[in-house]
Image (cartoon, grey):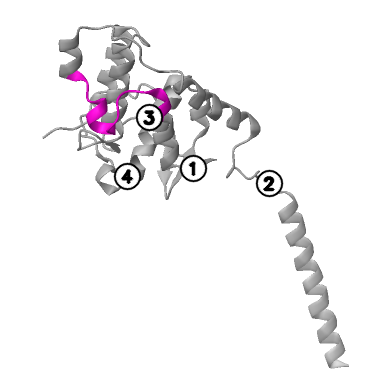
Amino acid sequence: MADSKLHSKFSSLFIFSFGIFLIFFSIQPLFSDESKLSAKQNKILKETFAYLETLEPKRIKIDKTTYNRHSQFESFFKFSFSGKKLSRWIQSRSKKYTFGSTGDYVAMYQDGEILLGRGFFSLNRLDRVLVLLHEARHADGKNYSHVVCPDDFPYLNTRDWKIHPAGKKGCDSVPDGGYGITASFLFELGAYGFLSQSDAAYRYNSEISRVIRD
């Protein structure tokens, strides 16, 4: 009789506890799996690479002395400027793209995967290329990891003013890191007339400002 009462008491307690659990669980918000790109996001990513592959050089629009003085693309990438080759260069370094929270960054690279934040998909196509190019550089090893920007770093983040580089790991200590290679790419766009010289210079200066030289 004592055993029966004890069993009944535990059964009632279990049912009550399980009921509370179900009520609690049912009112919690269910989050969708953001580890994969949606159809719309995939479309945007493909359009980004398609745009990059249209950037094939024809004739230099600036004087050759200026070009030879400032062009670093070939020394960084080991091939002459070509959007198609650059697209393959990026894709050879990251075959997996996912969507999720990236904190204070537009995108992040980790273990062969580029994690794209919500802000990435609202960027224009050129800025999306710059982000992918930048993140792909991180696949080449720790030498291309970021260093902390100076606390008095005065420059704005051109892609998102809410992101403040000062005092954060958002600068490079090597000339051919993520920011150096995007700057070299932008220089070629200006040199070949894909961007106006003023726009190319503005964008180039923004990227190269993140390369901290002692």
- Residue 210 rendering spot, x and y as whole percentages: 25, 29
CA distance for labels 2 and 4: 37 Å
Q: In this rendering, is residue 210 above or below 21?
A: above
Image point 28% across, 18% down: which residue? 187
Depth order, front residue of 61/164:
61
Q: Residue at 36% across / 10% down in the picture? A: 195
Q: Quadrant of residue 134?
A: top left
Q: Is residue 153 above or below residue 193?
A: below
Report the residue marked by disc 1: 95
Q: Give neighbour class at mark 2: few <14, some 14-19, many 20+ (Cα, 10 Å).
A: few
Contact, mark 1 vs mark 3 (Cβ under 8 Å): no
Dot 3 or dot 2, earlier in sequence: 2
Is residue 185 in view? yes
- In space, the residues marked 1 and 3 are separated at their CA atoms by 27 Å
Q: Amino acid at mark 3?
A: Ile
Q: Which mark is residue 140?
A: 4
Instruction: State how far apart marks 1 and 4 are (Cα).
Output: 14 Å
Q: CA distance from mark 3 to mark 2?
A: 29 Å
Position of residue 64 measured from the top left corner of the image (x, y, whole percent): 19, 10
The residue type indicated by label 1 comes to Lys
What distance separates the C-alpha of mark 1 from that of mark 2? Answer: 29 Å
Q: Residues within 10 Å of mark 4 (few under 14, many from 20)?
A: few
Q: Which residues are magenta?
A: 70-86
Q: Which mark is residue 163?
A: 3
Q: Which SS class for mark 4?
A: helix
Front residue (pair 10, 50): 50
Query: Residue 59, image x and y in percent?
Result: 32, 9
Whether residue 103 is visible: no
The residue lying at 32 percent from left, 44 percent from top is 140
Check disc 2 and report the residue beneath it.
30
